[in-house]
Amino acid sequence: MSSFSVAAIALIIIAMRFGASTAQLSPTFYDTTCPGIATIVRQAVGQAQQMNPRVGPQILRVHFHDCFVDGCDGSLLLDDSDADGIQSEKSALPNLSTAGYEVIDNIKMALENSCPGVVSCADILALASQILVTMNGGPSWNVQLGRRDSTTANRAGTTAIPGPFETLSQIEAKYIAQGLGATDLVASSGAHTFGRARCATFSQRLFNFNNTGSPDTTIDPTYLQTLQLNCPQGGSGNTLNNLDPTTPDVFDNRYYTNLQNNRGLLQTDQVLFSTADRPDVAAIVNQFAVSQATFDAAFAQFMINMGNLNPLTGSNGQIRLNCRRIN
């Protein structure tokens, strides 16, 4: 058999496996087993948002970080457990600032009261993310459901999560490893249209960028002065700053006009527009900046694409009764 034939067969097998796993996901998966799922989740996240307006970006970030480590399987939700041999992903560096886990706990409790043993924690993350994005002015999409929960965690695997100090090529490589492209990268970064970031995640840009002794030249001078006041040298690295200085609590496309004006907060934000040898990526930023509808469609498609990353379905995994520990 020729090497071409072997390669072709291998690709077909991979496609069949991928198709078999994602084909079991469906927006109607719980229509008969838990028909009130959307209402229950919406009520719970609505109450959470009234108490904490940051809950939308928090839950969305947890979903993103979960999916980038072995797929969307709820593994990030697991706590440390010596008895079960679980070393939590929460304690890994990329996840130390994640939050909102108690909201997932509350949703799970409400669903267990209504539909015991039916809805996975992985699906809760996916559905809660969509509802919270929509609540904050963003697009809606048909959330694919039917995932099951992992019975293991992969703390070492959290290196797959993009970090706030990485170059565009480093970030893009992590997306490519997940089967995601440049449009996915730019669209998903638009989630920084709402939420906050600590000074520690970008202060290296303000005074001594890359050991130059000077600030990052891609920061607008007026914006730089504001950030330096908010995050002075030697100050608290935990001070929060709006990721979007224009409409910080609305899910819109102003994130991209901020990049055009050199007002991206994180290094990983501004590199999407200011990396000299990547005009193709800057062009996507420009498309989203001029069209809310184009951004909305691309973000919704990214969320579907990400949600299809290696889901556990059928008899794989389990439906956890408590999202923090295996059954």
Image: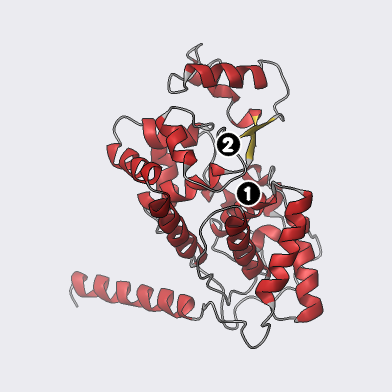
Residue 269: give x, y in percent of width and height. 48, 36
Residue 4: give x, y in percent of width and height. 19, 70
User: Which amino acid does the dot numbered 2 rest on?
Assistant: Leu
211 left or right of 196 in image:
left
- The residue that label 1 is drawn on is 57
284 left or right of 163 in image:
left
Q: Is 169 in front, or is 270?
A: 270
Residue at (37, 53) in percent of width and height = 181
- The residue that label 2 is drawn on is 243
Check the picture and name the quadrant holding the N terminus.
Answer: bottom left
Give the class, few, some or many, for how many residues have Cα within 10 Å of label 1's Cα (few <14, many ≥20). Answer: many
Q: Is 135 in front, or is 193?
A: 135
Residue at (79, 72) in percent of width and height = 110
- What's the CA distance linking mark 1 and mark 2? 10 Å
Q: Quadrant of residue 270?
A: top left
Residue at (66, 15) in percent of width and height = 233
Residue at (56, 53) in percent of width and height = 137
SS assignment at label 2: loop
Label 1 or label 2, whichever comes before in sequence order = 1
User: Which amino acid does the dot numbered 1 rest on?
Assistant: Pro
Q: Does 279 sit above or below residue 108? A: above
Q: Are marks 1 and 2 in contact (CB under 8 Å)?
A: yes
Check the picture and name the quadrant holding the C terminus.
Answer: bottom right
279 left or right of 88 in image:
left
Residue 119: give x, y in percent of width and height. 68, 76
Q: Quadrant of residue 42?
A: bottom right
